[in-house]
Image (cartoon, rainbow, N blue to C red):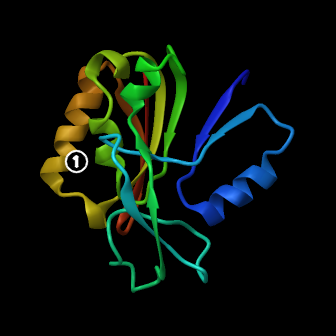
Amino acid sequence: PSRVICFEPFSKAFNCLHYNTENTICELYNVAVSDNNNPIKLLGSNEFSGGSNIKGNSDGGIYNIEEMVNCVTLDSLFENNIVDKIDFLKIDVEGAEVDVINGISLDNLKKVNKISMEIHYKHISTDTEKTMYEKINKAGFTNSFKFTVPDLAIQTGWR
């Protein structure tokens, strides 16, 4: 790729990301991607390095750190001329997948060529998932591959 844009809101993970991508083409942003541009409470852990989330401590109480983090929408990336298209959009937001998709207009979603996302069923209802896929499909994507394990799925689609 000629450009890689990374978003990581959790300070502990952001520091690791910064270290691991030093002297690369990666552009790093220490913000969450959501459906609005307002700060939000993020939960993280000193013991568990596998993620952080904005959806609560329903994962066995593993989150013991709270941080207020800034948010951006995918639409704001287009509006602020950070991007004019996205070739590959990877969404791994520990349960906030619907928020990310709600933060991009149909017109801007049509400027995305491929999507791969992790879906956390603990944080999404069947109706909400259906609405999210309807929007993605309306933008011209095919649900070409879906890998499902209990409570989790990886979904990819392209035009």
Question: Looking at this view, is 37 or 74 the one in front?
Answer: 37
Q: In the figure, is residue 64 to the left or right of 96?
A: right
Residue 15 quadrant: bottom right
- According to the image, label 1 marks what residue? 129
Question: Looking at this view, is 81 or 118 the one in front?
Answer: 81
Q: Position of residue 125 (x, y in %)?
A: 18, 57
Number of dots carrying numbers? 1
Q: Position of residue 32 (x, y in %)?
A: 46, 49
Q: Position of residue 112 (x, y in %)?
A: 45, 21
Residue drawn at point x = 51 percent, y = 47 percent: 31
* Residue 148 sits above or below residue 112 on the image: below
Where's the N terminus, which quadrant?
Answer: top right
Where's the C terminus, which quadrant?
Answer: top left
Residue drawn at point x = 40 percent, y = 86 percent: 61
Q: In the figure, is residue 20 to the left or right of 84?
A: right
* Residue 125 sits above or below residue 83 on the image: below
Residue drawn at point x = 58 percent, y = 69 percent: 50
Q: Badge 1: few (under 14), some or many (20 or more) residues near its Cα, within 10 Å?
A: some
Numbered disc 1: secondary structure: helix
* Residue 109 sits above or below residue 122 on the image: above
Residue 4 quadrant: top right
Question: Looking at this view, is 99 or 128 the one in front?
Answer: 99
Amino acid type indicated by mark 1? Glu
Residue at the right extreme of this rendering: 23
